[in-house]
Amino acid sequence: MNAPHAEPKGLPVRDLARVGRILRVAAAKGWGHYAQRLHLGPPPEGPESAAAGSDARRFREALEELGPSFIKFGQLLSVRQDLFPEAVIAELRRLQDAVPPFPGGQARRLLEAELGRPVAELFADFDERPFAAASIAQVHAATLTDGTPVVVKVQRPEIEALIQADVEVLFYLARLLQDHLPELRRYDPLGLVEEFAETIGRELDFRLEGRNADRFRENFAEDPEVSVPRIYWELSGRRVLTMARSLGHKAGAAYPADATARRRLAASLARLFLAQLFEHGFFHGDPHPGNVFILEDERWCFHDFGIVGRFSPHDQENLRQLFFAVLAHDADWLADVYFDMGVAAASVDRAAFVRDLDESLERYHAVAGRGSSFAEILHQFIRLGQRHQIRMPREMLLVAKAFMALESLARTLDPAFNMLAAFEAYAPHMVGRALAPEVGWARGYRVAATLRTTLRAFPLTLVRTLQQLEKGQLGLRLRHEQLEEVSRHIDRASNRVSFSLIIAAVVVGSSIVMSFHTGPHLAGIPLVGLIGYVLAAMLGLWWAAAILRSGRL
């Protein structure tokens, strides 16, 4: 799509029929009266339906009737747990974009138009009968001229033009909703359509999916438990993607047959996902059984990188602290992380938010290890954010959705799978690879994170203090004589304080190392901590001697 995220200024005449179709579907679902409120004229002719079922179910049915673009839009909305009620989210998750396949002859012609050569020259064999079809593309089996089996993903003819037109209609309707229905403004209709336009635009360019697959493969190049099909770029383009064919098994109680192997694979899947989040900052956004399966050699094979998430270092740090806060059962720490991640309204009552978080943590830890879902606790936190008017960034919501799919997949292999335990096993990778007992290392991580935050905030705090000092708000009056002498005294005092802080930091750091018993040991004593103590003692003695020699205590 050309500039899919650019909001159109007006509605083209060609789209009026589509708007009429939307109004008729809305009327059939019991919402025809909104036509007048949106200044679209009277409701469509005929009595408005008193449609049976909940609003959520009728909304889902309306999206299905309106076709592929609206189904895709609904699937995007299903991630927004911070905006919509649980009943709506549950219905939107039921949306399916499976549609009848288009003729194989059309796929052949599109292939030749995209790649510029006859199919007979590109492939030794091309099966015109697709073995999978969805709203945007369908997949065909083929064989390369060297005998390599591949799969070819071919975009539906005219789907891009259809989606472009529907996006224009969605922008038009979103502006009307925002202008004339004040009760819906909190959902930010224009923002949601803008996000959809960008997302669907990326999905329509298969080259981006191929690059995502290449990046994912490179990230796990040294990991023997991961396989990502090779992309054949010479046989790929904007509307065609050719990749190696991988045959495997869906994860489940029947495969592998050995229960120990299933438990190992469940733990491996969790480790791989945590590595995506915390090491790569690039993760598969839709890890359901159709996209993640097990090869014959018991490696995990990842497919379909149309939906991926990206994390900045700041996002990774927030998620890291969120995990540790849950593990440490620290609602106050969790609130700090949550406020840093979300967009909080000025009226947020932090104390009430902390109390609600603490109750959720109590419930989670009360059943942790007995089938409790980590995805569910994330879901609860998002719901609490909604209640307290804190909106979450899309990537964090995508993580929660991915966690739900991952936990479900892992538990088909190991019903006793526990995400919290998987994170505890992975945590040493984030805290010096030192596995401390219980949650001691989680507390240690918070100390380190707090120190870093304090140091980051120190310059601003110093500026504010100096400003208050200038205004006399600290109640401190200064009268000086011989300014240069005073300056020298201040310099000496600052140097002494700085050196003392350095010695104190060495002592504190050595104490932490001693308490965790990390690194090499000498006679049962951590060697790094011992060296730190000796260094601090030597520096302290030298400094004391220097002060005594100066004659200025």
Image (cartoon, rainbow, N blue to C red):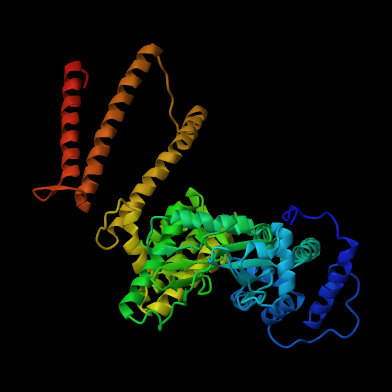
Is 58 positioned to the left or the right of 472 in the image? right
Q: Which residue is at the front of the view, 323 or 489?
A: 323
Image quadrant in which the C terminus is located: top left
Q: Residue furthest left?
A: 523
| Quadrant in the picture for the N terminus | bottom right
Q: Is residue 166 above or below residue 372?
A: above
Is residue 551 visible in the rendered image? The answer is: no
Which x, y percent locates residue 378? 48, 67
The image shows residue 246 at horizontal and vertical percentages of 50, 69
Q: Is residue 66 left or right of residue 542?
A: right
The part of the image, by quadrant, that contains residue 298 is bottom left
278 vs 545: above or below: below
Number of labels in the image equals 0
Q: Which is more toward the observer, 7 or 67?
A: 67
Which residue occupies the foreground of this view, 278 or 491? 278
Query: Can the viewer see residue 500?
Result: yes
Q: Is 440 positioned to the left or the right of 211 in the image? A: left
- Residue at left 30%, top 29%? 497
Which residue is painted at 20% across and 25% down in the image?
Answer: 543
Front-most of 198 and 384? Answer: 198
Can you give x and y, in whole percent of width and height, for residue 369 in the image? Answer: 34, 75
